[in-house]
Image (cartoon, helix red, strand yellow):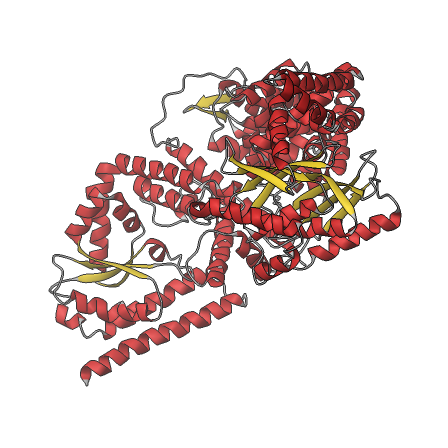
Amino acid sequence: MQVKRRQNLYENAAALLQKRRDDLIASFQKGAVAGFLTQHTRILDEYFREQFENSEVGPRIGISQNPYAFIALGGYGRGEQCVHSDVDLLFLFQKKISRDAEDLIREIVYPLWDIGLDVGYATRTLKECMSLAAKDYEILTPLLDARFVCGMSPLYSELKERLHRKILSRKSGKVVTWLIESNRQRHLQYGDSTYRLEPNLKEGGGGLRDYHTMLWLARIQYKYENRRDLEYFGKLSHDEYRRLNQALQFIWQVRNHLHLICGRKCDQLHFENQLRVAEVLEYKKTNGLQPVEHFLGVLHGHMGFIKQQHLMFLYEMGYITRGKPRKRPSKKTRIDGLAVNREMLDFASPETVLKRPELMILVFQESLRLKIPLSPEAKRIVQEFGHRIDTNFANAPETVKAFERILVSPSPTFNVLREMLNTGFLERFIPAFHEVTNRIQYDEYHLYPVDKHLLRTVQTLKNFGQSESEMEQLYGRIYKDLKNRKPLLWAALLHDIGKGAGEDDHSISGGQLAERILTDKGMRAKDIDTVRFLVEKHLFLIKTATRRDIHDEETAILCAREIVDPQRLKMLYLLTVADCMSTGPNAWNDWTASLLRDFFLKVLNILEKGELASREAVADSKNKIDRALEAAVSEQEREEIAPILEVLSPRYLLYATTDQILEDIRRYRRLGEKDFVWDVTRSAHSDTRTVKICAKDRPGLFSSIAGVFTLNNIDIVDAQIFTWRNQIAMDIFEVRPPPDKLFEEERWVRAADNLNAALDGTLDLATALRNKLTGIRRRKRPPARRPHRIVVDNSSSSFFTIVEVFTDDYPGLLFNITDALYRCQLDIWVAKIATKVDQVVDVFYVRDFDGQKVDRPEQEEEIRAAVGERLLPDVPG
């Protein structure tokens, strides 16, 4: 009976704790709680103290004979208890662990597990704590945050005293080195959260663990007790401490909401939760930013501040990222008013800067020359005296000249522009930068905030040619041969500056803004015109290469007419490459690089040789035919393939090599009376398959192939469609194979059977796909921010109507689009598939069944309506 009563007592205490937590969390969700972490910690403290006072096991242990205490560790010890954070507890005994300790834990901890709290505990003596902490620093760091909850308080004091006397005072160097190295490894594993679109709020660079590391180091080196000591003892200025508190409060708020959304502890802010957090925090659409983009921009700003404070703190302690003490300075500055101190660049005094504001640009120029960073104090001075960087200062010729030296100078390992951004100098020097700082684009395509992307683009340009790869060497040669690189680098720095204006076409608004900025800074009119052109056209090459038929001479000629000057083309090409490489891995791969290079060389050839380039293309096609005839093994074979060579289309001849032509002829000769033949091969440099199909051309052929691939879980990555003049389709598909590699061969056989059935009319693809895909959700990705867009273009090609479809991807999409085009009685002659990541952009060159363009307004509207109708449902049909 007594046991039952005692059990009810424990359960009631846990239930009361649960109610208090629920009430507190409910108030937090209504926005009616200030200091949630502190109050949440206090509720837990009250539970442990009440249980300690009412414990029936405690008297058996005998606290006076065998002193013990409850010690909070980790986040609970720091008083930073988020909604679903672990509750870490140490049951500390002075000399020996009581035999009744397990009953005490059962009495105190088990009820918390029953209500769903994650409680981690350890039961140790003082001696065991010291022994384990001295050997394992993973055990030591939670002890640095230890806080007394209840029991014998002198025992807690003795724990802290022994910790400092026996471990920290003797091994501080080793502990600090381990902390710094652990920090470095953590950043390598979780990445820099200030550059991540799915940041880790705790472990990533700029996350809470950076702040924890600052606290731990301060406790080890200076015996600080709490966060406020960082300001009190001068490690942070008053403004830095205020901003640190703001950043922490915001991240904790986000973390708590993330815990509530996930229903568990979670620190990775995944795409699917970002919208929900932004909604909970009541962010609104503003200045062209979606609510979630506004929220992420604020979050990145706060995490960026924590990252910078963390790095400055390490420098001030005399440690670089690997935790080794700094060497004595060996470099000297040439500029009066600056000084080198502990291998960092500093101002002689704040008063010197007040008298000579130009030192605020010269310090960065000297930092680049000496390849050493600014000291934390120098960064503070630049931040605090930022008001001195007014319009007159920013546009003064000597200031602009110094900045341009920094902009154009090679900096393979030391990025001074990033320091200018972090200190706020860049925003003062170019006020328009304020609108793109921490500006996020909510998609899977743009990996970095706009401001950091711009700086990465500049750095990528300046690093061209350092790699041994053939492509990098090409970029390096072009960059090195440029007579004047300054306009290119200015364009790289400003190419996305128009995104801050919130207008639809950031290239045009950016070009106009760049012109105003550089006019104010006194740049030559000719160079300003070049920069404006590069900014306005920075997407022109990549869009043309990925959305137009680059095997059509007309495409290259139209592009050449737009660019006119070979030097501008070279700069535009380098800017395009650097922009794509600096956007993220989804924007740049070997296929995109090769496609863009080939197109660039074609346009350059036309600009340098004019009409001669077209004549060379014709001559090259004739040479391919001659080489194919020469490769015939006998006179009979030569006579057999000669008529086939006569029907090859000009576009096909421009694309194919002689070996490919011979291979396709062999495939054609296998066709005979069949509807199609295909060959499937593994691609050389990726886990994809190349499917080469020779088929008798007919309306709807492409949509049939697309539908069959979808039916068999085969994703189309790219497609090249060629039609010979004898109505033979020679199509090349790059695809991702079926998921189950063990049965891949069987799946390809089934796919071939399906295509035969679809072509002879015995398989209704639309019905088969509808049955397969009903209930299948669209692929997991951020919800669409933009509506479908269908563009019908009759101006870019003399012979084809071009249909562009912008939409979100889902299984069966390609079949839906191509089937809609077929039902509009359109033949697809060229297809460019999935050339973006945040939205699919499928492009089709089409003509009607009579071989004509469809250029009447009512025809264009019919195409838009037919395709648009098929984009609305989640499944085909």
Q: Could you tell me if residue 750 is visible in this image?
A: yes
Q: Across the whole image, how many numbered discs are drawn on residues?
A: 0
Q: Is residue 19 left or right of residue 731?
A: left
Residue 360 % position (x, y): 59, 27
Q: Is residue 316 above or below residue 249?
A: above
Residue 122, by quadrant, is: bottom left
Which residue does the image show at 68% across and 21% down from the upper left?
639
Using the image as rendered, state which of residue 140 and residue 272 is in the foreground: 272
Residue 384 % position (x, y): 57, 37
- What quarter of the picture does the C terminus occupy? bottom right
Using the image as rendered, state which of residue 709 and residue 663 is in the foreground: 663
Q: Is residue 27 above or below residue 71?
A: below
Using the image as rendered, state which of residue 370 and residue 197 is in the foreground: 197
Q: Is residue 15 left or right of residue 633?
A: left
Using the image as rendered, state which of residue 368 and residue 572 is in the foreground: 572
Q: Could you tell me if residue 281 is visible in this image?
A: no
Which residue does the image show at 67% across and 35% down from the upper left?
546
Q: Is residue 273 above or below residue 29?
A: above
Q: Is residue 35 above or below residue 549?
A: below
Residue 151 % position (x, y): 22, 64
Residue 406 % position (x, y): 59, 22
Q: Is residue 112 left or right of residue 758?
A: left
- What quarter of the picture does the N terminus occupy? bottom left
